[in-house]
Amino acid sequence: MSTAAAGDAYRHRRILSAELAQLLYILVGLGLGLTVPRIRRGPDLPAQQVIGILTTIGLGVLGLVAVIFSLGILVVRWVASNYSPRLTQFRDTPILRQTFAFALGVAVFCISSAFTIGPRVRVSMAVLITAIVLLVVMAGLLRTLQVTVATAIQLSPVLHSIAARGRDVLDSVYPAEPGTMASPAGPLPAPCTTVTWPNPTTVLQRIQVDRLVGAARTADAVIVLREPPGTTLQCGMPVADIHGHLPAAVVLGGLVVGSERTFEQDPLFAFRLLTDIALRALRPNDPATTVQALDYLEGLLDRAAATPTGPHRVTDPNHALRLEIPRPGWDEFVRTSLDDLITAAAAAPSVLLRIQALLERLRNRAHPDHHEVLTQRLARVNEHLATLFPPPT
């Protein structure tokens, strides 16, 4: 297996899991369709009448499958054009895949039941009851999908969801548990080998920490990664330094890559999405939406201001340093969140005033080491406001 294939293993397993779930629904529907019509006990109904009902339901559900598929495409396109092309929450929601797979299972049940009944004169009422129960469950899934669609295109739930996931990622990437940090003063093993990315352009989505720590412990080595999750890797780009004797393929195999950023281990992704939404709202001159996005950005920046600086150093059970992962610093959080917005909002007074209030509050609460970064942005905001509202002469 190539290093690129090894890095994609986690993503491939998720795709395979979704496909297996869909296949499972189809097989269950087929099994019920071949078994239920063979029931001989209980009240029965005219077979031809039941076949007509099953055929109608099966063909109707197949049409519904096309509607669900089209709905997913429309919502994904709407979210990409109005919020951000990087926002994939609705596309990846389990209810969309589950509803699609369950609809296929219902269609398979109805069609296979109709063929199983065949030329029989009468058939057990259990066939019709089973079809009705499946339709009721299908209606429940469609209702849940409808609510999910409505949530995916409403601003406040989207902002709340992004901010909540951003807080979760910050808590996981910047752990506060004692014993997970190793002293940076200790010398690293020799020799030092630099690992470069050998494949085409891709995005580093996730680092398999346990796998890399285990490999480094076995080889008595230390892996120092150069780039954090969320970075776009270019061919030939240095990605890690190996201190000790460890094959480069082992390090590359512990990097999960893909075509887009994800929330899993990327603490800057939520900030990027909220900034995208704020910037897109400025394009059609919707400053109120930008201000609303800034409300959630302030909460995330306040949380980021309390995170520790420096890389995350992971130790083995013997408290020996085995893996070092770079993490965004305070300057990167502020730059990602505000720099583009300050420039784009030069002619939007309400947005500038909201950014000014955000910066002043953060500066009052943040550690003194963080003040300079905030003061620089505040000076730019004040310059724009002075241009819009010049002092009276």
Image (cartoon, rainbow, N blue to C red):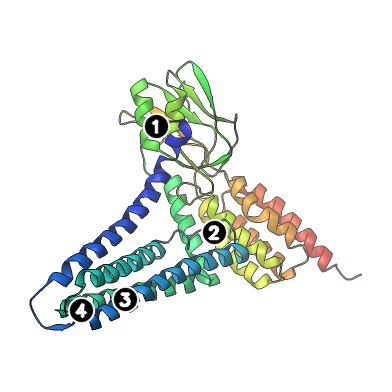
- Quarter of the image where one finds residue 287: bottom right
Position of 331 relative to 117 (above/below)? above
Precedes in sequence: disc 4 or disc 1: 4
- For numbered disc 4, what is the local secondary structure? helix
- Residue under label 1: 212
Q: Are the residues flagged by discs 4 and 2 in contact, CB closer than 8 Å?
A: no
- Residue under label 2: 87
Instruction: Give the CA distance from mark 4 to mark 1.
Output: 54 Å
- For numbered disc 2, what is the local secondary structure? loop
Which quadrant of the figure contains the C terminus? bottom right
Q: Amino acid at mark 2?
A: Leu
Q: Position of residue 65 (x, y in %)?
A: 41, 69
Depth order, front residue of 16/229: 16
Q: Amino acid at mark 1?
A: Leu
Q: Position of residue 28 (x, y in %)?
A: 24, 62
Instruction: Give the CA distance from mark 2 to mark 3.
Output: 39 Å
- Residue under label 3: 55
Precedes in sequence: disc 2 or disc 1: 2
- For numbered disc 3, what is the local secondary structure? helix
Disc nearest the viewer among 3 and 1: 3
For label 4, count other residues whose C-alpha is less than 10 Å away and answer few (under 14), some (14-19) or many (20+): few
Instruction: Give the CA distance from mark 4 to mark 2.
Output: 41 Å
